Image (spheres, grey):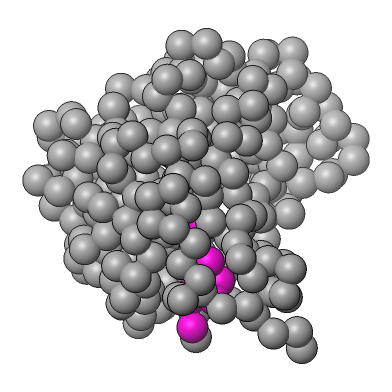
Amino acid sequence: MTRFDNRDYVSMTMEFRCNLQCVHCMIEGTMDRLRPESDARFDELLAVNAREARWKGLILTGSEITLRKDLLQLVKRARQSGFSHVRIQSHGMALEQTSFCEALLEAGVDEFFISVAGSDPRRHDEITTVPGSFEKTLRGLENLDRLGGATVLTNTVITRRSVDDLPAIVDALAHIKCLAQMEFWNYWPMREDDEKDLIAPLGLVTPQLRQAVAKAQSLGRSIEIKNMPQCMLGGDANLLVNHQPHLYVDEAFWAEFGRNGFYQCVYRERCASTECLGLTTAYIRKFGWEDGMLAPIGRT
């Protein structure tokens, strides 16, 4: 199932710039006003963990964490304070530089969480809107694979633009031996409507997602699925993992996040699932309640 226990990790948002403009970016309208966590806040986190050993792993995240010039220093300090694992969350383009990969590994990064939007340059680059981004990300993954010493996780956001590409994405990454876990995040906008027409109907998502999951599992990879109704996943229902590591982020983010309107479902009061987030406001406005497709999970 899943390889990592999210309770062992803490995430800190240390950057709010990005050199991609992905069409599904949830925070594109807020990056100019959200602020990364301060150096003082980072120091505080390290001190807490050095004293209490509360978490095993630190995730350095943001819009694109590799844009921080002091990233290597942040990683080294995290390791010195007692974190057994340091993960960076990235689109992976900077990893095409072998020297940068080597420097990150030497500093102490042992986990890389890389976003992959499509299975080939056309599909991926149409979503990131930056020509050449797929080739850079793929070369970065291949560099990590060749250098060794790190575990890779990938993340793919499921939208109308990517839903039919999910199985092919698994195939495109089949040769990356250090890829231990693939995550599939069903898209939601941080607003009450689907202005970009990116939400895919559940009936379209489910068969493509489950085919991708089967392919990934046949390669020995762990899986996490996010933001899907659990009752839609059949035998893959146990792969739904919506809980996340504790996140340090600008408080203004949560006001925006709350607009999604999760936990709406006609069967909510009758359903025993503790992991499902139900539907969002934007989904319901576009496709309705899907009460003929969803079903309450029984109590055991």
Q: Nearer the viewer, residue 277 or 213?
A: 277
Q: Is residue 58 left or right of residue 165?
A: right
Residue 64 image offset from top left, x and y in percent: 42, 28
Q: How many marks?
A: 0
Can residue 229 be seen here? yes
Residue 127 image offset from top left, x and y in percent: 22, 40
Q: Residue 11 appears in which quarter of the rendering?
A: top right
Q: Is residue 197 magenta?
A: no
Residue at 19% across, 45% down: 124
Q: Quadrant of the C terminus?
A: bottom right
Q: Nearer the viewer, residue 10 or 177?
A: 10
Residue 141 image offset from top left, x and y in percent: 30, 49
Residue at 33% across, 34% down: 195
Q: Quadrant of the N terminus?
A: bottom right
Q: Residue furthest left?
A: 122
Decide: is 238 above or below 205.
Answer: below
Residue at 38% across, 34% down: 25
Q: Residue 130 appears in which quarter of the rendering?
A: top left
Residue at 33% across, 66% down: 205
Q: Nearer the viewer, residue 210 or 115?
A: 210
Q: Is residue 148 left or right of residue 191?
A: left
Can residue 101 be seen here? no
Which portion, as a residue range, is magenta?
227-234
Residue 95 image offset from top left, x and y in percent: 31, 36
Q: Is residue 122 left or right of residue 265?
A: left
Q: Residue furthest bottom?
A: 300
Decide: is 37 above or below 22.
Answer: above
